Image (cartoon, rainbow, N blue to C red):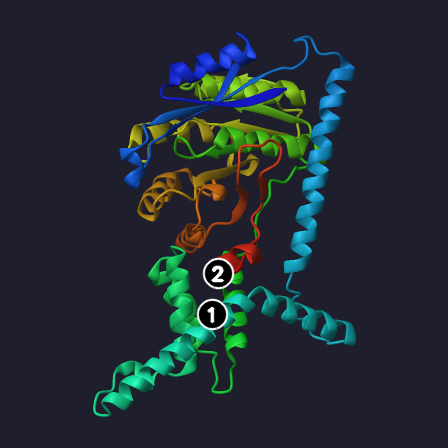
Amino acid sequence: MVIRKFQAETEEAAILQAKEELGKDAIVMNIKFEKPRGLRKFFRKPSVEITAAIDDEPSVNTGEDMLSKMQKIQKNLEAAKKKQEQEQKKDIIPEKEPEKTQKDDLEKSASTIAIENRLDNLQQMLEKQMETEDKNRKETIDEDNSEKTEKSDETKTDACIRLVREKLIGNEVEEKFADVILGEIKKTIKKDTTIDQILSSIYQKIVLKLGQTKEIEVSEEQPKYVFFIGPTGVGKTTTIAKIASNLKIQKKAKVGLITSDTYRIAAVEQLRTYANILGIPLKVVYSEEEMAEAKEEYKDYDIVLIDTAGRSHKNAEQTEDIEHLVKVVPEEERDVYLVLSTTTKYRDLVKITETYSKLGKYNLIFTKLDETCCIGNILNIKMLTGVALSYSTSGQNVPDDIEKINAQKIAKQLLGGQ
């Protein structure tokens, strides 16, 4: 399969480029409208980027052709899994056990060293900034002993907490959530607590707030129907393709696909392309009745992934349509994943989560981590809703660019680590 991106001033021009290079059978998989911001809007015109694809082999695939493609996808998935496991091993903080052995102490020591190394840059920055502020404060006092500000009585602990708060808010963590975390840490700080101990405590507190992640699991007892819901443009369809690849290749599950996103022809064709490569059946449904029929047809499958149309959280009627579709499947047989973009404003995310909460229990997937430098919204929405985090995505590549949300990694980034 050949996948290319084309950019032009209009959607028609970009599609024309795709047809000229890839041929008339090319399929448009994604359309992205780009508007220059800031000063760039005076020098650059708005543009459209489309992602198009075409099979690089004859349309009738032999068993050998499909096997070759599957092996290639499997190889990519295994490499990605190995890399993820290695990264997770670096960040794991072993839980405390009642009986301490020499091995436990060594593991604890290694974990503490790992945390300190990860936060070393932040610690150095805090100490340097506190030294500078202390120097400036002394100079001010020397100039006028009668003039003392509130900061003149600030301790190193207070300064550390204040600077960490600024770092969190700079990463778009809401002030109320930053204050909750730091308020809980303040209660545990003693006079002899060092800066690195404070930072380690904050780091571990954030990890605890992010909580355990929930992956999509295959049930041995009955088929599991997994709905993906969320607003338009967050990347639901691509995310489903990545998860389907993982379940089919890595977990050897019998996977089925359903889409009710009939409002965008490109979305159906995009999912159909991935389904053909993976050898997974795809059914398109237009109503609750057809959803019930598709459910019956898939009764012998391990897991069924269901793509829904993107809906505006401002339109109650549209979200009701999804609610009716979801409730065709009994609660004990379904899982629901709300897909959100990290680039969406916090206030909009609050409204979106409120709207979709009517559908009942759901888990969270965050997309487009590669399109933002601030990931505070992951912590914000987790603390706001209390629901489980699951996956994050950081690109369009299938089956790559997806991973289980790593709480240690997120905490490190929020505190300024790399």
Q: Quadrant of residue 241?
A: top right
Residue 75 percent coordinates (x, y): 73, 33
In primary-sequence order, the first of circles 1 and 2 is 1
248 sits left or right of 242 in the view: right
| Tag 1: amino acid | Met
Q: Residue at x 68, y 27 (%)?
A: 254
Residue 50 percent coordinates (x, y): 46, 23
265 sits left or right of 99 in the view: left
**Mark 2 neighbour class, 10 Å CA radius: few under 14, some 14 to 19, many 20 or more:** some
Determine the CA span between mark 1 and mark 2. 10 Å
Q: Which residue is mark 1?
A: 125
Q: Which residue is mark 2?
A: 416
Quarter containing the N terminus: top right
| Badge number at residue 236 | none
| Tag 2: amino acid | Gly
Q: Nearer the viewer, mark 1 or mark 2?
A: 1
Classify 389 as above or below 29. below
